């Protein structure tokens, strides 16, 4: 009887181990399948009320016009002490929106993130790009802006204000559009007065 009971216990332990291995294997397959499907579609679900991270048709049309690499340098303070919680959350939203721009640009937009600490090379680069730190009521200076560059063109957004969150896409899309629009408008002047300092023929 003891041998029988011992055999039953060993059999039960073996079945438990077998079922555990099967369960782990099944979970592994589920995770692999989920990652494969997610990478195949590469689309995000925008659950925000105002669809803040779903790019508009106008923005997508601008991104389709890109014929060369556009660099976006994002300057955002990373220190937990310097960056208030609300600005940190808002900064993450800016990054999420930039990721959507990058994803919809077919690799034409490259986002580089910098942490402009005081007296650092990143801070010097931010200032040269036209991005300045904003003084908070607690006396700390924080950065949350970007610069868009293409060839010899550069446009800066000095600071993202949280109250303009609904206009973030417009601001970024306008900056991208400005750097890729290299043709200058031609202006013609018609006047009967000597606007260029030279006498004019009154018959003309």
Image (cartoon, grey):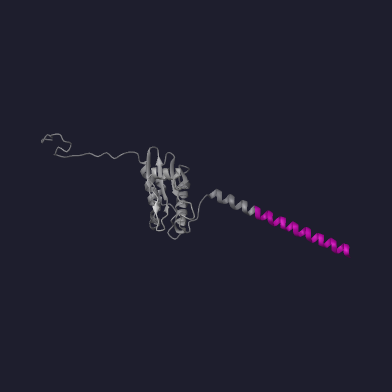
Give the prevailing secondary structure in the magenta stretch.
helix
Q: Residue at x 65, y 55 (%)?
A: 27
Q: The C terminus lies in which quarter of the figure? A: top left
Residue 78 x %, y %: 48, 51
**Residue 95 is one of the magenta-drawn residues:** no
Number of numbered tags placed on the structure image: 0
Name the residue: 53% across, 50% down: 41
Q: Using the rendered image of the protein, determine whether residue 88 is visible from the camera's viewpoint.
A: yes
Q: Residue furthest bottom?
A: 1
Quadrant of image for the N terminus: bottom right
Residue 25 as seen in the image, left or right of residue 191? right
Residue 12: x and y in percent read 79, 61
What x and y, as percent, mark residue 173? 39, 48
Q: Nearer the viewer, residue 191 or 84?
A: 84
Q: Residue at x 84, y 61 (%)?
A: 7
Chain part drawn in magenta: 1-28
Q: Is residue 58 visible?
A: no
Q: Is 25 covered by the magenta stretch? A: yes
Q: Nearer the viewer, residue 44 or 174?
A: 174
Residue 48, how many percent across, how many down?
46, 59
107 vs 130, left or right, is right
């Amino acid at each position: 009887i003891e041998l029988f009971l011992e055999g039953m216990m060993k059999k039960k332990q073996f079945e438990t181990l077998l079922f555990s291995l099967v369960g782990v294997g099944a979970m592994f397959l589920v995770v692999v399948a989920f990652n494969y499907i997610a990478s195949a579609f590469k689309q995000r679900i925008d659950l925000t009320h105002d669809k803040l991270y779903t790019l508009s048709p106008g923005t997508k049309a601008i991104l389709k016009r890109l014929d060369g690499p556009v660099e976006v340098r994002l300057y955002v303070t990373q220190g937990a002490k310097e960056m208030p919680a609300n600005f940190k959350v808002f900064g993450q939203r800016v990054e999420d929106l930039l990721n959507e721009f990058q994803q919809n640009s077919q690799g034409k937009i490259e986002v580089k993130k910098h942490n402009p600490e005081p007296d650092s090379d990143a801070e010097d680069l931010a200032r040269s790009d036209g991005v300045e730190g904003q003084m908070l009521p607690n006396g700390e200076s924080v950065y949350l802006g970007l610069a868009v560059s293409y060839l010899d063109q550069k446009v800066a957004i000095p600071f993202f204000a949280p109250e303009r969150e609904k206009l973030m896409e417009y601001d970024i899309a306008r900056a991208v559009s400005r750097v890729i629009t290299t043709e200058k408008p031609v202006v013609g002047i018609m006047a009967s007065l000597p606007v260029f300092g030279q006498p004019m023929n009154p018959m003309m």
